[in-house]
Image (tube, rainbow, N blue to C red):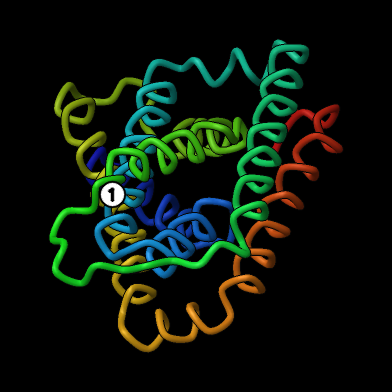
Amino acid sequence: MSASTAIIAILAALLVGAMSPGPSFVIVARNAIGLSRGDGLATAIGMGVGGVFFSGIALLGLYTLLASVEWLYVGLKVAGGLYLIYLASKIWRGAAKPLAFDTTQAVPANARKSFWIGLSTQLSNPKTAVYYGSIFAALLPQHPPLWCYFALPPAIFAIEAGWYTVVALCFSSKRPREIYLQWKAWVDRVAASAVAALGLRLILTAHKVGI
């Protein structure tokens, strides 16, 4: 397999992974609907930066450390699960609070916070690091040309941020927002329950090394 073909295969596999339901999807959709389109986009950018971070780990081969040092992998899974549960508790506690939207505000004041929520949500799941590492190990040539190290990170950012941008744009349109405002408490609690369940699953499966 040529380097170019390998890169395309890696990007396709990572796109499928990004499109799989998970905490990242829930957080982007919730921020896009419940806060603003700008917040959803900021969250999507955070996801993209997280993807670049994981690609760097994979390119350096550090994913083998997670796979071989069991206690480190278990610790990271527990820590990631606890973070997701903490994030879910914040969403749940704010479920009953009404929201006021300023449709003239072009750049939301909390876009920076949304970016960090997106980045930390992405980084909180060590299984993503192992997934990246597995894809790279399976598809990337043993000695890839130098250009791969420069081409992959921005391409992966485009994949991750691009997909979640689509999610943010779809969920931030007028009709979804009207539905959200009408059912805010229930939507937030469902989102919080989903994120908490994913966090709990990380903790309960922490002893299982692998995907």
Q: Is residue 7 left or right of residue 30?
A: left
Q: Is residue 51 left or right of residue 147?
A: right
Q: Between residues 199 and 179, which one lies in front from this camera angle?
A: 179
Name the residue carrying label 1: 42
| Residue 47 position within the rendered picture, expressed as x and y whole percent measured from the top left | 38, 44
What secondary structure is marked by label 1?
Answer: helix
Location of residue 82 by image quarter: top right
Location of residue 171 by image quarter: bottom left
Q: Between residues 124 and 60, which one lies in front from this camera angle?
A: 124
- The answer to whether residue 175 is above or below residue 190 is below
Q: Amino acid at mark 1?
A: Ala
- The answer to whether residue 44 is above or below residue 142 is below
Q: Residue at x 50, y 32 (%)?
A: 123
Mark 1 Cα shell of 10 Å, populated few (<14), some (14-19), many (≥20): many
Q: Residue at x 62, y 64 (%)?
A: 96
Toward the bottom, the furthest residue is: 175
Tally the numbered discs: 1
Q: Is residue 109 left or right of residue 116?
A: left
Q: Between residues 37 and 101, which one lies in front from this camera angle?
A: 101
| Residue 3 position within the rendered picture, expressed as x and y whole percent measured from the top left | 25, 38
Q: Residue at x 69, y 59 (%)?
A: 194
